[in-house]
Amino acid sequence: MEFHLSDVKCIFRYLIGTPNLGLCFKREKTYKLLGYCDADFDGDRVERKSTSGGCHFIGGCLVSWTSQKQGTITLSTVEAKYISGASCCSQLLRIKHQLEDYNMFENKIPILCDNNVAIDLSKKPIIHLCAKHIDIKHHFIRDHVQKDTVELQFVSIKD
């Protein structure tokens, strides 16, 4: 219980120190989808589960974001990032299908990730030694990368 209380205090300290920050929504002529994904390995100090997070943009405007504890305990940073990418892909595909109702069609949606091994894992059908333990349900991102529905791209953690 003390772990959660210290986390809540940290969030409140952050909110108190950033009252001038907000979200900016610009009018854009293009409605390109874009996703960012990240994960912390072994971030939950109680259950030792990682936390996945993602931001989803249409035309440069934030339309949704997620932050959730992963359902399984990951054995590596690569696995945590790969699962985060799969979660981000899933949300972007939902948004893509909603946009299709308005005759807006997207191909090769970029998902920005800060782990090159996770990106390589999504591109190659060969099961790497570091990924043989990853649950099959998370490999659907590889299927969408091969179909050119999404594309994982590297982004530096500084950016």
Image: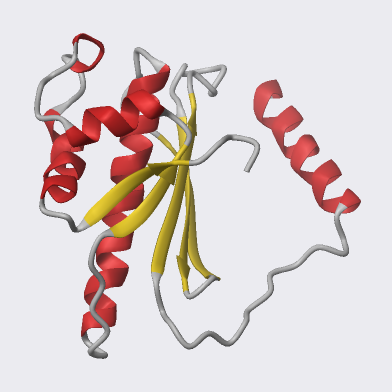
The residue depicted at 17 percent of the width and 55 percent of the height is 148
Q: Is residue 150 left or right of residue 2?
A: left
The residue depicted at 25 percent of the width and 54 percent of the height is 150
The residue depicted at 34 percent of the width and 41 percent of the height is 85
Q: Quadrant of residue 131?
A: top left
Q: Is residue 125 left or right of residue 46?
A: left
Give whichever of 41, 147 is nearer the camera.
Answer: 147
The residue depicted at 19 percent of the width and 47 percent of the height is 145
Most extreme residue toward the top is: 129
Quadrant that contains the C terminus: top right
Q: In the rendered image, is residue 35 in sight?
A: yes
- Seen in the picture, residue 152 relative to 104 is either above or below; the reply is above
Give whichever of 16, 84 is nearer the camera.
Answer: 84
- Seen in the picture, residue 42 relative to 16 is either above or below; the reply is above
Tell me how many marks there are.
Answer: 0
- Seen in the picture, residue 49 relative to 89 is either above or below; the reply is above
Q: Quadrant of residue 137?
A: top left
Q: How is the model colour-coded?
A: secondary structure
Q: In the rendered image, is residue 71 in sight?
A: no
Q: Position of residue 80 (x, y in %)?
A: 38, 26
Q: Is residue 52 left or right of residue 139?
A: right
Q: Position of residue 95 (x, y in %)?
A: 31, 70
Q: Position of residue 73 (x, y in %)?
A: 35, 19
Q: Quadrant of residue 138?
A: top left
Q: Position of residue 1 (x, y in %)?
A: 65, 24
- Seen in the picture, residue 150 relative to 134 is either above or below; the reply is below
